[in-house]
């Protein structure tokens, strides 16, 4: 199913971006090894990264909450999750992350941030309020979009309540723990 999602993402005119398989394996390993039960994804797109996350969560008897503002992407993501057999552990929210994230009440073990890069810094504080102590925030594309995300990376790497490192897998994953 993951290969089918990748193929659909590469179709002419699809305009769908997805993490590379190595990043998927990285996320799966983090979620599974930390026995995460509650994960939040900001930026569902067509469901590729969410499928990796949800497959680990299903083994952990956990759940994924994911969101996207584009109704077409939400529909594609829902289809991806159902085809992969993980739809039962995924809740998909449609709308603007700036409006949705502040309304979320559950504490999360891990948050995967992969939306429009210009919003990473705006979303940081609302995300941190929803992460458990020892929880992880994984932000995608910090190497491939290094110039745009420089401010975000500087902020998490110098925040007194965070420990953060850039992991050179895929497009670069800034992996940040709440102390």
Image (cartoon, helix red, strand yellow):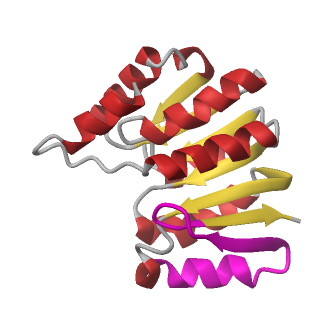
- The magenta span reads 149-173
Indicate the quadrant where residue 129 lies. bottom right
Q: Is residue 40 left or right of residue 78?
A: right
Q: Residue at 85% across / 73% down in the picture? A: 161
Q: Is residue 62 left or right of residue 79?
A: right
Based on the picture, tell me whether residue 85 belongs to the magenta stretch. no
Is the residue 160 above or below the residue 51 in the image? below
Q: Residue at 79% across / 41% down in the picture? A: 33
Viewer-proximal residue, 162 or 126? 162
Viewer-proximal residue, 168 or 161? 168
Q: In the rendered image, is residue 106 in sight? A: no
Image location (x, y in percent) of residue 41 = 56, 44
Q: Residue furthest left?
A: 12
Number of marks present in the image shown: 0
Q: Is residue 41 left or right of residue 63?
A: left
Image location (x, y in percent) of residue 55 = 60, 27
Which quarter shows the C terminus?
bottom right
Image location (x, y in percent) of residue 169 = 54, 63
Is the residue 31 above or below the residue 154 in the image? above
Image location (x, y in percent) of residue 145 = 41, 75
Which quarter shows the N terminus?
top left
Q: Residue at 77% across / 80% down in the picture? A: 159
Viewer-proximal residue, 167 or 141? 167
Is the residue 38 above or below the residue 114 in the image? above
Q: In the rendered image, is residue 50 in sight? A: yes
Q: Residue at 67% across / 22% down in the picture? A: 58
Based on the picture, tell me whether residue 172 belongs to the magenta stretch. yes
């Amino acid at each position: 199913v993951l290969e089918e999602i990748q193929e659909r993402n590469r179709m002419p005119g699809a305009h769908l971006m997805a993490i590379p398989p190595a990043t998927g394996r990285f996320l799966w390993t983090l979620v599974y090894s930390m026995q995460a039960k509650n994960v939040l994804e900001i930026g569902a797109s067509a469901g590729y990264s969410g499928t990796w996350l949800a497959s680990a969560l299903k083994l952990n008897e956990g759940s994924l909450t994911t969101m996207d503002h584009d109704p077409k992407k939400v529909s594609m993501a829902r289809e991806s999750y159902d085809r992969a057999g993980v739809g039962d552990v995924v809740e998909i929210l449609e709308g603007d992350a700036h409006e949705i994230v502040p309304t979320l009440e559950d504490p999360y073990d891990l948050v995967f941030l992969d939306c429009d890069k210009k919003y990473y810094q705006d979303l940081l504080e609302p995300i941190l309020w929803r992460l458990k102590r020892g929880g992880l925030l994984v932000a995608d594309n910090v190497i491939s979009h290094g110039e745009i995300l420089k401010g975000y990376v500087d902020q998490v790497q110098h925040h007194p309540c965070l420990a953060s490192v850039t992991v050179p897998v895929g497009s670069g994953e800034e992996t940040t723990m709440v102390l």
